[in-house]
């Protein structure tokens, strides 16, 4: 009874939203609601042949695209609430299965149970997948769903099914790795500019610099979305570990002779499709890129990142006691000489909030570097979400078998870098001899591989 009541309340909410939504021109909300329901039912039942099925799914997708945000929410609610499996049919099939256990009829009963639990929602999603641009439509539809999920938790069941379907359809075996160059189609390069999520691309000259002879850019594509990169990584070819992103992005710096490169630095990794959240293929991207780079540049021995620490200052604001515990007596003495007279000093408050960072190599910068580096080390190595690192970038790289190699002070002096991590960045090292061991240890109990110098920072 409780489940039925919840569904009834959910359907009532669908009607309320549809009534306030912008429907197709000249069509009442009630008529639009009934037409969508009928089309969804026809999709779920696979009525007609293959051609009519695709035409019906295409019309339904067009209807969805022409709705405003409230109308789309109503559409998603309808799929979630009206097209699940039949509880009575599941109960009957389960009882038959239990009765058939150990008999020759067990496997047939198991098949009927499996069929009973299959959701009509999945059949509808599969129909969308079959139409032209259907994969992109489903990815974008899930992006809409995720935006509404917090306020409409009844959509969770649809999200689970859609995520599972996308995980299958975007299996890494189907993806194509492509190197992007300055000569790639302009429309594709525009997408790279649009989707860059780590270090904003400010101009075509900036982009050209990132695609020069001493740089590489690789992206994963799905064959059904040929002009939509799913994830891309930008790489710098160097002789040593990078410790400053502004140097990497300097458009006026001379082009490095890539034939001398011994180090590949992954300095930006951008996921581009919000609707693919939870569908992981970043680790496969890095492995494929490493193989490609090793083939083209046999001298490469070191593969590492220069990564942001996006959650550092926001965590620090909520954990002031932990932050101040990293400051020693000698730190306070040096800070006092540089203009910060104790924990309540306004200048320190401004620094910790990510609102101000002193110029490089000043007395204040030199005084702040030791304690804030200890804070960053404790955050990366000690703060967890369950057994995984709290920081999302750390969670990604450590989950892929990397080692926390080095913290870099004043590595990103952009406003974004200062605001999120006091300008600090971190090198994660991918050591081919330790990746599998690190990956297994981290997956088993959250163990983190880090250099001895970083671990010593935890003891101060």
Image (cartoon, rainbow, N blue to C red):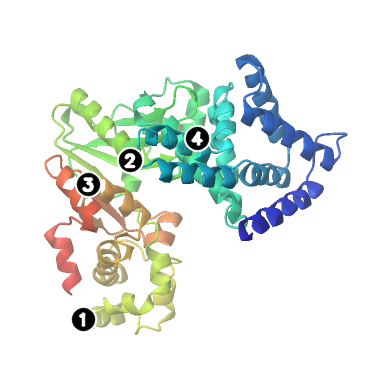
Q: Nearer the viewer, mark 4 or mark 2?
A: 2
From the top left corner, tell me how far across and down residue 211 is, in percent: 37, 29
Q: Earlier in the sequence, mark 4 or mark 1?
A: 4
Within 10 Å of the Cα at label 4, are there few (<14), some (14-19), or many (20+) other Cα atoms? some
Whole-Å distance between the Cαs marked 2 and 3?
45 Å
Residue that carries the numbered disc 2 in the rendered image: 102
Whole-Å distance between the Cαs marked 4 and 1?
70 Å
Residue that carries the numbered disc 1 in the rendered image: 330
Callout 3 secondary element: loop
Whole-Å distance between the Cαs marked 3 and 1?
37 Å
The answer to which quarter of the image holds residue 448 is bottom left
Residue that carries the numbered disc 4 in the rendered image: 115
Within 10 Å of the Cα at label 2, are there few (<14), some (14-19), or many (20+) other Cα atoms? few
Q: Nearer the viewer, mark 3 or mark 4?
A: 4
Callout 2 secondary element: loop
Q: Is residue 139 left or right of residue 400?
A: right
Residue at image position (32%, 78%) is: 324
């Amino acid at each position: 009874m409780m489940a039925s009541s919840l569904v009834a309340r959910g359907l009532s909410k669908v009607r309320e939203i549809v009534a306030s939504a912008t429907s197709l021109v000249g069509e009442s909300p009630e008529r639009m609601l009934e037409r969508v329901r009928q089309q969804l039912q026809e999709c779920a039942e696979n009525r007609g042949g293959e051609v009519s099925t695709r035409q019906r799914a295409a019309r339904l997708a067009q209807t969805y695209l022409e709705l405003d945000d409230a109308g789309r929410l109503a559409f998603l609610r309808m799929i979630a609430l009206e097209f699940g499996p039949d509880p009575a049919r599941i109960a009957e099939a389960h009882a038959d299965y239990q009765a058939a256990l150990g008999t020759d009829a067990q496997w047939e009963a198991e098949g009927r149970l499996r069929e009973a639990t299959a959701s009509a929602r999945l059949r509808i999603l599969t129909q969308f997948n079959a139409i032209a641009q259907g994969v992109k439509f489903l990815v974008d539809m899930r992006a809409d769903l995720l935006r509404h999920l917090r306020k409409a938790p009844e959509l969770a069941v649809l999200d689970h099914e859609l995520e599972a379907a996308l995980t299958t359809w975007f299996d890494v075996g189907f993806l194509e790795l492509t190197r992007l160059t300055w000569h790639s189609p302009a429309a594709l390069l525009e997408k790279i500019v649009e989707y860059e999520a780590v270090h904003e691309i400010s101009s075509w000259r900036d982009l050209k610099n990132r695609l020069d002879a001493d740089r590489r850019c690789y992206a994963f594509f799905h064959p059904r979305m040929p002009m939509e990169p799913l994830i891309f990584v930008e790489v710098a070819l160097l002789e040593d570990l990078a410790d400053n992103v502004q140097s990497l992005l300097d458009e006026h710096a001379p082009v490095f002779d890539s034939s001398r490169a011994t180090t590949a630095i992954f300095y930006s990794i951008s996921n581009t499709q919000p609707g693919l959240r939870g569908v992981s293929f970043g680790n496969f991207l890095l492995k494929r890129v490493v193989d490609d780079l090793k083939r083209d540049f046999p001298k490469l021995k070191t593969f590492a990142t220069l990564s942001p620490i996006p959650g550092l200052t926001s965590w620090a604001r909520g954990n002031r006691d932990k932050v101040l515990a990293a400051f020693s007596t000698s730190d306070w003495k040096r800070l006092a000489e540089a203009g910060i007279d104790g924990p309540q000093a306004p200048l320190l408050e401004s620094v910790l909030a990510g609102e101000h960072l002193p110029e490089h190599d000043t007395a204040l910068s030199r005084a702040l570097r030791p304690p804030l580096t200890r804070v960053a080390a404790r955050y990366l190595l000690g703060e967890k979400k369950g057994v995984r690192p709290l920081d999302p970038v750390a969670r990604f790289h450590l989950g892929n078998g990397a080692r926390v190699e080095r913290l870099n002070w004043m590595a990103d002096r952009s406003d974004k870098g200062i605001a999120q991590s006091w300008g600090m960045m971190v090198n994660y090292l991918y050591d081919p001899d330790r990746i599998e061991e690190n990956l297994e240890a981290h997956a088993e109990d959250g163990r983190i591989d880090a250099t001895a110098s970083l671990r010593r920072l935890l003891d101060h």
